[in-house]
């Protein structure tokens, strides 16, 4: 890999930006995005480094990119350059040969796209990532396929409302990590077809899906696998806030513009956990496709208030399929980061989900209550390695026992 040159050396002079073609300028914006579009924080697992040792060249490139991203002069120059690009956009000329020129409307559309991309990146470079829409691309390797799973997501602006209802507008580290783990070892999450799965196929639910990364990665994996087995599975991605749901639907359509070929049904639906705020012998009646129990439930970084833990427990209690003797074990996979600012929220999870009592079997098919079956601690590096930071995640496997 070739080290990226500094923006002040690579970019054309600000006063002459408009002299470049739209295609050249779009390429330069993509180059800047490589540097400044922030990666999702804390998703590089420490334990994976043992089996995935980097070459000296790759390590040097990462160090150089980190230093370049942190250079205040280069960032300030990039902000000025992008500002100049947007200001001069109306002066850009169509430089293609006369017989190859597209119509005026098509050219103006290309300029508009360039302006939007530059404005989005400008918000990021100016330190206001929450102020702009950001497109992210993820690639997850899996031993089951010859090529990695590719997912493209749009993060939208987080609302400045007093509540945290729109935090799902952004992609967070827990979702990235959970999607990566699912792709690497889908059998750990009960996603591989087996004789134990019900005849109608797997039913998978994601709580607090946000931008939909976990559901989309699961859908792409299963659509490739189930295409060979003809076993239909259902994935339901849920969230609460209307703006988050709208973006979730957009991301599903963007990743499957022609629909999923076969084997998988993927849809987005509203689900408000607060309707399960109180335990009840008869839970609320939900419309399809939430009217039937699920074999697997995912939740990535969904506990922001202490009340959420209780709501989530009651929601999972109502929607997770009860086990049957000798059958596959329905399971709720919850992944959370251990944030210093959310200690009480993290503690609430272990308060509402007890550990399995030693005297109780987890394999007799007699589900009595939802319990923590096991817990895994996962340590990840932050992308700015100069800060020496690490993020710890907890993966809870919760089921009936």
Image (tube, grey):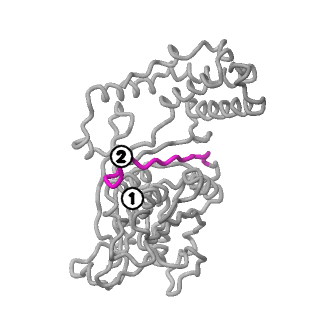
Dominant SS of magenta comes to: loop
- Taking the magenta stretch, the answer to whether it contains residue 240 is no
User: Quarter of the image holding residue 133?
Assistant: top right
Q: Residue at x 36, y 69 (%)?
A: 193
Q: Secondary structure at mark 2?
A: strand
x then y, percent, for residue 350: 35, 67
| 3 lies above or below 388 | above
Residue under numbered circle 2 = 391
Residue under numbered circle 1 = 335
For label 1, count other residues whose C-alpha is less than 10 Å away and answer few (under 14), some (14-19) or many (20+): many
- Name the image quarter holding the C terminus: bottom left
Name the one closer to the observer, 243 or 328: 328
x then y, percent, for residue 346: 40, 60
Q: Residue at x 50, y 63 (%)?
A: 262
| 214 lies above or below 373 | above
Q: Residue at x 22, y 42 (%)?
A: 50
x then y, percent, for residue 96: 68, 21
Mark 1 or mark 2: which comes first in sequence?
1
Q: Is 123 placed left or right of 195 in the picture?
A: right
- Name the image quarter holding the N terminus: top left
Residue found at the far right of this picture: 104
- Taking the magenta stretch, the answer to whether it contains residue 155 is yes
Q: Is 328 placed left or right of 90 in the picture?
A: left
Q: Which residues are magenta?
A: 141-158
For label 2, count other residues whose C-alpha is less than 10 Å away and answer few (under 14), some (14-19) or many (20+): some
Which of discs 1 and 2 lies nearer the camera? The answer is 1
Q: Which mark is residue 20?
A: none
User: Quarter of the image holding residue 66?
Assistant: top left
């Amino acid at each position: 890999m070739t080290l990226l040159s500094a923006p002040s050396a690579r970019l054309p002079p600000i006063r002459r930006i408009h002299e470049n073609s739209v295609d050249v300028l779009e390429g330069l914006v993509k180059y800047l995005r490589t540097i400044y579009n922030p990666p999702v924080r804390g998703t590089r697992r420490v334990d994976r480094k043992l089996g995935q040792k980097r070459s000296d060249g790759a390590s040097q490139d990462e160090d150089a990119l980190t230093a370049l991203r942190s250079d205040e002069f280069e960032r300030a120059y990039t902000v000025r350059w992008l500002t100049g690009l947007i200001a001069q956009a109306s002066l850009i000329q169509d430089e293609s040969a006369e017989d190859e020129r597209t119509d005026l409307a098509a050219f103006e559309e290309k300029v508009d796209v360039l302006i939007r991309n530059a404005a989005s990146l400008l918000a990021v470079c100016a330190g206001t990532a929450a102020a702009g829409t950001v497109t992210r691309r993820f690639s997850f390797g899996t031993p089951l396929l010859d090529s990695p799973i590719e997912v493209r997501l749009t993060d939208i602006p987080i609302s400045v409302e007093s509540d945290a209802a729109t935090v799902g507008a952004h992609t967070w580290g827990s979702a990235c990590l959970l999607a990566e783990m699912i792709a690497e070892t889908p059998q750990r999450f009960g996603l591989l077809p087996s004789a134990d799965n019900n005849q109608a196929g797997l039913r998978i639910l994601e709580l607090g899906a946000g931008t939909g990364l976990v559901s989309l990665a699961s859908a792409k994996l299963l659509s490739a696998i189930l295409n060979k087995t003809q076993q239909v599975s259902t994935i339901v991605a849920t969230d609460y806030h209307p703006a988050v749901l709208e973006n979730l639907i957009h991301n599903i359509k963007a990743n499957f513009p022609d629909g999923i070929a076969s084997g998988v049904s993927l849809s987005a639906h509203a689900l408000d956990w607060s309707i399960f705020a109180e335990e009840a012998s008869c839970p609320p009646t939900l419309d399809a496709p939430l009217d039937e129990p699920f074999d697997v439930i995912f939740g990535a970084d969904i506990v922001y208030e202490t009340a959420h833990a209780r709501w989530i427990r009651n929601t999972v209690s109502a929607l997770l399929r009860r086990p049957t003797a000798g059958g596959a074990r329905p399971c709720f996979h919850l992944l959370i980061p251990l944030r210093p600012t959310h200690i009480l929220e993290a503690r609430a999870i272990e308060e509402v989900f007890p550990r399995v009592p030693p005297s109780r079997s987890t394999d007799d098919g007699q589900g009595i209550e939802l319990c923590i079956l096991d817990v895994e601690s996962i340590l990840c590096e932050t992308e700015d390695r100069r800060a020496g930071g690490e993020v710890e995640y907890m993966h809870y496997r919760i089921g009936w026992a």
